[in-house]
Amino acid sequence: MFYEIRTYRIKTGAVPAYLKLVEEEGIELQKQYLGQLVGYFFSEIGPQNQIVHIWAYPSLDERERRRAALAEDRAWQAFAPKIQALMEEMENRIMKPARFSPLA
């Protein structure tokens, strides 16, 4: 299993608006295409205005296929600019768990 960890820095004061958009318009669409949502978080202590979401994929090929299908969806194409307007920075990591990890 591979885990995609996406971290976004959101404009100051815009985290509530970002979360509202995702909850009302985006998350069901993402779950339909991307599959297994491990978690969706916002920062409370430490660096502020951060959103972190984690998705699990059985393979990198499957991740690529699913993300490409999402990108082609017209509803996603209409939604994505709404949240991108609230972002300042994006970071994406692909992680593979150690054999002894509970998520392996």
Image: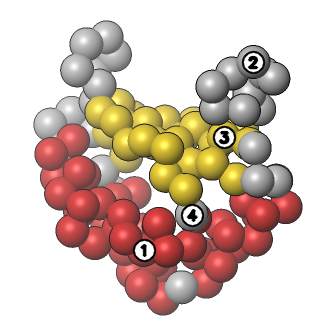
Marks 2 & 1, CB-CB < 8 Å contact: no
Q: Amino acid at mark 4?
A: Gly
Please name the residue that numbered disc 4 is placed on: 35
Residue 73 coordinates in the image, percent (x, y): 54, 85
Marks 4 & 1, CB-CB < 8 Å contact: no
Please name the residue that numbered disc 3 is placed on: 3
Q: Tag 1, which secondary structure? A: helix
Q: Earlier in the sequence, mark 2 or mark 3?
A: 3
Q: Earlier in the sequence, mark 2 or mark 1?
A: 1
Q: Earlier in the sequence, mark 4 or mark 2?
A: 4
Q: Which residue is found at the position 74% from the left and 27% from the top?
A: 97
Distance CA(mark 2)–CA(mark 3): 15 Å
Please name the residue that numbered disc 1 is placed on: 29
Q: Earlier in the sequence, mark 4 or mark 1?
A: 1
Q: Amino acid at mark 1?
A: Leu
Q: Amino acid at mark 3?
A: Tyr
Marks 4 & 3, CB-CB < 8 Å contact: no
For disc 2, the neighbor class at 10 Å (few under 14, some 14 to 19, many from 20) is: few
Q: Earlier in the sequence, mark 4 or mark 3?
A: 3
Q: Tag 2, which secondary structure? A: loop
Please name the residue that numbered disc 2 is placed on: 100
The answer to whether 46 is drawn above or below residue 99 in the figure is above
Residue 12 coordinates in the image, percent (x, y): 21, 33
Distance CA(mark 4)–CA(mark 1): 10 Å
Q: Tag 4, which secondary structure? A: loop
Q: Is residue 5 left or right of residue 86?
A: right
